Amino acid sequence: MSAYAMTVSITIGIYVILAISLNIITGYAGQISLGHAAFFGIGAYASGMLATRLGAPFFACLPFAVVVTGAVGAILGIPCLRVKEDFLAITTMGINFVVQAIFLYIPFFGGALGIANIPAPSIHGAEMTKSAYLAMVLLFVLFAILVDGWLTRSWAGLALASIREDETAAEMSGVNITRFKVVAFVLGSAMAGLAGSLYAHFMSFISAADFGFTESIVILSMVVFGGIGTLRGPIIGAIILGLAPELFRPVLDYRTFVYGTMLVLLMRFQPQGLLGLDSFIVRNAKRIFTRRAA
Amino acid sequence: MLAQQIVNGITIGSIYALIALGLTMVYGVLKILHIAHAGVYAMGAYLGLWAYCMVPNLFVAMIVAMTLSGVAGTLIERLLYKSMLDKSRIVPLIASIGLFIAMEEAFRLIAGPYVRAFPAHFRQKPWIFGPVRISAPQMLVFGVTLALLALLWWVLTRTRMGKALRAVSMDREMAEALGVATDRIISLSFFISSALAGAAGVLVGIFYNSVYPTMGDIPAYKALAIIVLGGLGSIPGTIFGAFLVGISETFLIGFVNIPLPRDALAFIVMIAVLMFRPYGLFGKE
Amino acid sequence: MEHLLEIDAISKHFGGLKALENVSFTMDRGEILGLIGPNGAGKTTLFNLITGRYPVTSGTIRYNGKDLSGMGPSQVAAMGIGRTFQIVRPFAGLTVITNVMIALGVSHYAGFWNSVSRYRTPASLKAARKILARVGIAGYAQQKSENLPLGLKKHLEIARALALRPSLILLDEPAGGLRKEEMDRLIGLVREINGEGTSVLVIEHNMPVVMQLCKRIVVLDHGTKIAEGPPEAIRNNRQVVEAYLGRTGDA
Ligand SMILES: Nc1ncnc2c1ncn2[C@@H]1O[C@H](COP(=O)(O)OP(=O)(O)OP(=O)(O)O)[C@@H](O)[C@H]1O
Ligand SMILES: [Mg+2]
């Protein structure tokens, strides 16, 4: 595998984790978030700052980032509990702008210079190679998939689904909607923090610009593109849209245009996403398989 | 100094109002967050510039920009949103964001990535009223905004069409049951709001003497913050929110040197308000 | 022995609107109590107060002697009060059996280990199927609930309420919008459930249905209680007749 292919794979792996984490909040619990990149950023900053300021090793920074981001997710989840639907969507977007502004304007966070020289992880004094890093990222992807699979099979996952479908009916069925929304926010944010930590130590340099609203939209499009509310959807979405910039390299100048147009066309003609429930592909695959079985 | 800040704040606020009003009207009838509205706004600026280069007359440029923007908005509604009303609300949202991205890129590919000046000429000397100086472009912004707001108010309150529009915005199904041609009214509201956005684009292009592909970015987010602050779908709330944000921006930047950028401020105000009034200042549950 | 439900001088104001004003009545264990009144009388609002959806403006609600004030809807549900909605609201995108499972989980949503355990266990599936069979919709278990006809959606809502193992269920216009046969099935079902020991508080506009089901009726009009008693007495009560006729006269 070339170094270039490895870099692309690592980036896509990080996006897969991000898409899975956002899908917990938006796909399973139905709480539209337009600010997920804020949590990605908080994880990256927490990890990068602990490493550069206090010289902590990567394997201490990563759990630290997860805990900090989860905690911030709980705190920022509180204002999010007050508002619903479109008000929530715009509130999360606002949170993204404010968090980004804090990174950019408060000297403690390095201001416009960001955080530089974040060390790559090392094992027994030897710096991790790119292929080892890729293997590690894939392990964390697997971990995210396991967490997701566990969640959707648990009573907690059922509670999230009920909130997505109808909050009032959920409450009347005994679901404490406040508690489970917080569960979704914390779990989703903590997982985004994990992705942030992986990103920071891979890039070695991070700045506020990496975690803006546009990045939130990129993550959300991955979830929706692949098929929101399923596990396969965000994974496929992150892989396809993560590869898109590479695939469109020959038409470099048009690639953002193509990206936007693709989103519009998909929502117009296949709003469930590529592999969502009831999508064209899934419907036909089901038909073919049931025919074989018969 | 103080009076001057207020005047500057009102100028900014009136531009915000023009953009946000359209957004709130569209939200009222369709319950859609129409992010691509800011794309229509930038398109209006380009159309105005193009028209002005053909016929150097501001009035003509304005009419051309407003009409074509209106048509563009109506097409967006007909071709895109119309089929998405029964889908989950994230579907039109993502479509709208995708469209906004594609529009900005289209402007860049067609007109080039650089900032274009708006070659309108004005008298150099500002008007002076006591302590307040008002430049000619500022006067233009005021004049046109006031005229458009007055026109909008007249249409909404005094015409059958406007009454029907407000009825649809209050309760679409009920209006339909009462015999309102909701389809036409919805398209109409897209036409009006997109025309307003187009006008705002031209005004901003003239006021800052610059037209560029991503000029819709900041208005897109800020107009969303404003309409949410005002209580999604509420017209008085939106006007109030627009001036509140416009004035507090000029004040806080002018006087208190807060360490946050002006563009995050609208969101801080919005989040603070939502904590006490989760449905916005003028919103109802 | 104390009453199952005590509504004690309840008022609920929405801004200037007095949706309920000083309403009191009690309900005994095992009873089917009817709650009637013209449109806008405050019936649904009373359900929303009992279930903790809105806080009361004043007054107290006691259930099994315990004050319900300050409790959220999920706590009230966990105490064993189930309800259905005037305009049905099943979890539309989920299957019928999943709808019931959600309410069966009421005992699992509290502790951490409880809520992270698997929900599809043989025991829970069996319990859910049993409830579906109880209300006669076992055949639809794997259907998406939005595809059920209205009558069966109402059965599903009852199933969901029963999954809370309630001692009281609140039915908001169960017969509303149903055809005659559907209505008869539903009345039969409510009777059976009541026969198995669950108390029922039912809002209903259809007088024959109320008269068949209830031994006692409470009548609300414009937020106040105007009458209470057995069906025959209610039918002949002048104030009640006027409340309804006055209403028809308006329309
Ligand atoms: N959340 C609310 N906010 C404001 N007013 C409300 C609210 N809920 C109910 N009301 C008002 O309270 C009054 C009583 O309404 P309620 O729904 O309890 O009537 P009802 O007896 O159930 O009528 P119906 O037979 O039509 O269902 C009505 O005037 C209604 O508009
Ligand atoms: Mg009612």
Image (cartoon, helix red, strand yellow):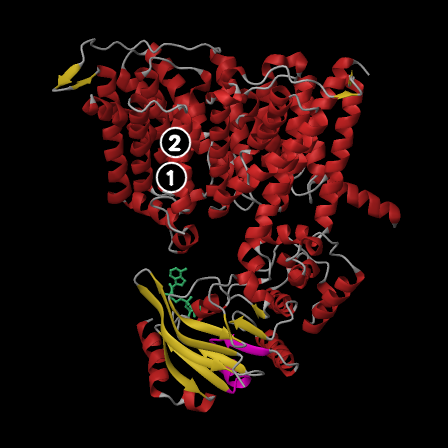
Query: Measuring 57% from the left and 73% from the top, which residue is drawn there?
Result: C169
Amino acid on which the number 2 mark rests in the picture: Ala
Q: Which residues are magenta?
A: C199-215
Residue A211 is left or right of residue A151, and the answer is left
Closer-to-camera residue (C239/A141): A141
Q: Position of residue A37 (x, y in %)?
A: 57, 30
Q: Quadrant of the N terminus of chain C?
A: bottom right
Q: Chain of mark 2?
A: B
Ligand 1: give its quadrant: bottom left
CB of mark 2 within 8 Å of CB of mark 1? yes
Residue C118 is left or right of residue B205, and the answer is right
Q: Is residue B56 visible?
A: yes
Query: Helix or strand or loop: what does disc 1 sit on?
Result: helix
Q: Position of residue C203 (x, y in %)?
A: 49, 74
Residue sitting at the far left: B130
Magenta stretch containing residue C206, yes or no? yes
Q: Where is mark 2, residue-wise?
A: B266
Q: Position of residue C16 (x, y in %)?
A: 30, 62
| Mark 2 and mark 1: Cα distance apart in space | 9 Å
Query: Measuring 53% from the left and 69% from the top, which residue is drawn there?
Result: C177
Amino acid on which the number 1 mark rests in the picture: Leu
Closer to the chain start, of discs 2 and 1, is 1
Closer-to-camera residue (B65/B241): B241
